[in-house]
Image (cartoon, rainbow, N blue to C red):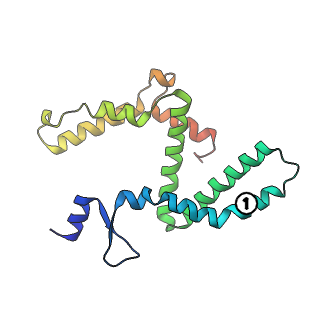
């Protein structure tokens, strides 16, 4: 078995900081986040608190909101700066759309990805003569789902509802 095939089967990647060690992809992407959080705290917390403490006339609730906004902005900046420009641009579009989708989910009390999955997962592979036919059917059903109005969204299609949220926050320009 090739090393690449083994990594795909086991969901592991080579740790870039070690010649031999492999780690689960899930650990690299998400499992290390508590440790990353501690590192970010050590990098930013004191300076952010000092800056907020300098805002004596600001109400406490406004200080909390400002702290959140500073942290979120810093994490987004760090994320974009860590990637080559082409990947950062691509990631920015994905982040914008995922956040807009989360806003739609919150606004309408839905889960768009779960609802889409329920519809698409009902397509049975055995009903199609080839993998290509099956994949085409899944793609067609998914495309239709995202573009047809839904009662739960006030008659809007999921794509339109997401576009409205992107527009609301100026992320569609």
Taking 172 as reference, is 34 above or below it?
A: below
Residue with the most extreme right position: 57
Give the x, y percent position of residue 113: 40, 37
Residue density around tag 1, few if under 14, some if 14–19, many if 20 or more, within 10 Å: some
Give the x, y percent position of residue 88: 51, 61
Taking 108 as reference, is 135 above or below it?
A: below
Taking 39 as reference, is 58 above or below it?
A: above
Q: Secondary structure at mark 1?
A: helix
Q: Quadrant of residue 167?
A: top right
Give the x, y percent position of residue 84: 49, 68
Mark 1 = which residue? Answer: 48
Q: Which quadrant is home to the N terminus?
A: bottom left
Q: Nearer the viewer, residue 142 or 31?
A: 31
User: What's the residue at 24%, 40% (across, down)?
Assistant: 136
User: What's the residue at 55%, 37% (across, down)?
Assistant: 103
Q: Nearer the viewer, residue 16 or 110?
A: 16
Query: Left of 10 or right of it: where is 111?
Result: right
Query: Left of 29 or right of it: where is 51?
Result: right
Q: Quadrant of residue 40?
A: bottom right
User: What's the residue at 47%, 62% (across, down)?
Assistant: 87
Count of numbered badges drawn on the protein? 1
Residue with the most extreme bottom position: 19
Q: Nearer the viewer, residue 172 or 66?
A: 66
User: What's the residue at 37%, 77% (across, down)?
Assistant: 18
Q: Nearer the viewer, residue 157 or 58?
A: 58
Query: Left of 119 or right of it: where is 169?
Result: right
Give the x, y percent position of residue 101: 50, 39
């Amino acid at each position: 078995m090739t090393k690449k095939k083994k990594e795909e089967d086991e969901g592991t990647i080579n740790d870039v900081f070690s010649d031999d060690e492999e780690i689960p992809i899930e650990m690299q992407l998400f499992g290390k986040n508590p440790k990353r959080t501690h590192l970010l705290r050590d990098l930013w917390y004191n300076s952010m608190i000092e800056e907020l403490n300098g805002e004596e006339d600001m109400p406490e609730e406004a200080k909390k909101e400002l702290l959140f906004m500073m942290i979120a902005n810093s994490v987004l900046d760090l994320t974009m700066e860590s990637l080559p420009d082409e990947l950062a641009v691509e990631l920015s579009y994905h982040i914008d759309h995922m956040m807009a989708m989360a806003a739609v989910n919150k606004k309408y009390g839905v889960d768009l990805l779960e609802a889409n999955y329920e519809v698409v997962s009902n397509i049975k592979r055995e009903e199609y003569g080839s993998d290509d036919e099956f994949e085409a059917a899944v793609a067609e059903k998914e495309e239709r789902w995202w573009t047809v109005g839904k009662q739960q969204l006030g008659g809007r299609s999921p794509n339109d509802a997401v576009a409205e949220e992107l527009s609301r926050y100026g992320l569609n320009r």
